[in-house]
């Protein structure tokens, strides 16, 4: 029985390999991305992320393995697929001497869609006030928004975003997060590469960690963090709680004292926090739990390098 294209996952990759000479850029990668999923790809420099994404986008050909995008093969380049994909890349091309709205109207013309769509997507990314500003006068964050708007002009089903928050200040980064969450809420599938691991943790339904061309982990951020099985550490100023009292709290596995702060390790942080609060009050009590960054570090053996 044949399956309709629309019933297929957004992406299926099976045993994908790609080498450049001796360098195995992608070394046997298999995964599936569901429709409507926000799927993150993270990994150190040179891990093979760009090569993998470019294979999915139909920009490069895999040496071996199978790739299916929206139920179709992206290679040889598939004209039926291109209008259904939205691409924002690190080197997104701009018509820099045009204004923001002129740039988007040019893109709508290239895609053959109604030019009024340019105004819609400009509003969607919150740049209506910059419609008449030349592209080369926009800030880094505004340009990233414009690149996202351009990727949306033809209302694609599957979006590829390559580090859209690179070189963006923290405030603009947060507002881009809001935009990305709104896109996800409209049912778009998003494949997202980032060097900001906190961002992958905050935004993505699932995250693939790639290292040396291989998929070293793939799961929800929560499952990846839980899989580390690290204790939560509750920190309390040492003048508020004695070491003996801390050790006596049910659920505390270890207590250490350093720089006038007691650190209580536990697998049941809620219970321990409540007990600490009863004994010492809630002020200046801090908790530290493992994050996706810890997972990344333990799997790749590398600190995150921006
Ligand atoms: N066109 C090419 N010719 C030869 N080697 C290449 C080419 N493109 C990439 N490589 C090599 O393949 C490996 C994977 O590169 P890729 O750009 O896919 O990694 P990446 O994870 O995207 O890295 P970054 O985070 O730095 O962008 C690297 O060793 C890189 O040097």
Image: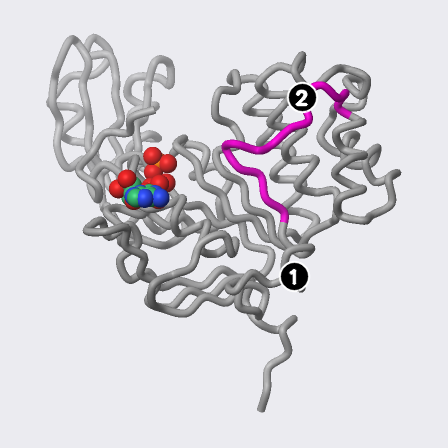
Would you say residue 99 sits in the magenta stretch?
yes
Label 2 crowd bin: few (<14), some (14–19), many (20+), radius 10 Å: few
**Label whose residue precedes the other's in the sequence (2 or 1):** 1
Kindly identify which residue carries mark 2. 96
Real-space Cα distance between discs 2 and 1? 27 Å
Q: Quadrant of the C terminus?
A: top left
Is residue 167 positioned above or below 301 on the image? above
Left/right placement of residue 66 relative to residue 108 reads left
Residue 268 % position (x, y): 28, 41
Splitting the image into 4 quarters, where does residue 81 fall? bottom right
Left/right placement of residue 153 relative to residue 29 reads right
For residue 79, the mark is: 1
Magenta-colored span: 86-100
Q: Nearer the viewer, residue 36 or 212?
A: 212
Task: Please give the count of numbered marks on the rendered protein.
Answer: 2
Q: Which SS type dominates the magenta stretch?
A: loop
Does the Cβ of the disc 1 residue fall within 8 Å of ligand 1?
no
**Tag 2 and tag 1, C-beta contact below 8 Å:** no
């Amino acid at each position: 029985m044949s399956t309709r294209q629309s019933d297929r996952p957004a992406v299926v990759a099976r045993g994908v390999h790609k080498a450049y000479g001796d360098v195995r850029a992608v070394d046997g990668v298999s995964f599936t991305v569901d429709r409507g999923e926000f799927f993150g790809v993270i990994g150190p420099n040179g891990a093979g992320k760009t090569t993998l994404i470019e294979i999915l986008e139909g920009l490069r050909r895999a040496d071996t393995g199978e790739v299916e995008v929206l139920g179709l093969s992206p290679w040889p380049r598939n004209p039926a697929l291109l209008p259904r994909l939205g691409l924002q890349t690190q080197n997104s091309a701009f018509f820099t001497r045009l204004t923001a709205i002129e740039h988007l109207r040019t893109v709508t013309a290239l895609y053959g869609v109604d030019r009024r769509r340019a105004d819609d997507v400009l509003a969607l990314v919150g740049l209506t006030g910059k419609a008449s500003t030349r592209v080369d006068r926009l800030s880094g964050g505004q340009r990233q928004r414009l690149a996202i708007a351009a990727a949306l002009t033809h209302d694609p089903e599957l979006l590829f975003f390559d580090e859209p928050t690179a070189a963006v200040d923290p405030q603009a980064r947060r507002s881009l997060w809001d935009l990305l969450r709104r896109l996800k809420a409209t049912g778009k599938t998003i494949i997202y590469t980032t060097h900001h691991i906190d961002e992958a943790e905050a935004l993505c339904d699932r995250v693939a960690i790639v290292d040396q061309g291989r998929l070293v982990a793939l799961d929800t951020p929560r499952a990846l963090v839980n899989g580390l099985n690290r204790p939560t550490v509750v920190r309390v100023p040492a003048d508020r709680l004695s070491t003996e009292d801390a050790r006596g709290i049910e659920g505390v596995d270890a207590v250490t004292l350093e720089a006038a702060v007691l650190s209580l390790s536990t697998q049941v942080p809620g219970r321990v926090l409540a007990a600490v609060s009863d004994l010492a009050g809630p002020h200046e009590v801090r908790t530290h739990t493992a994050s996706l960054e810890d997972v990344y570090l333990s799997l790749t053996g590398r600190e995150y390098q921006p």
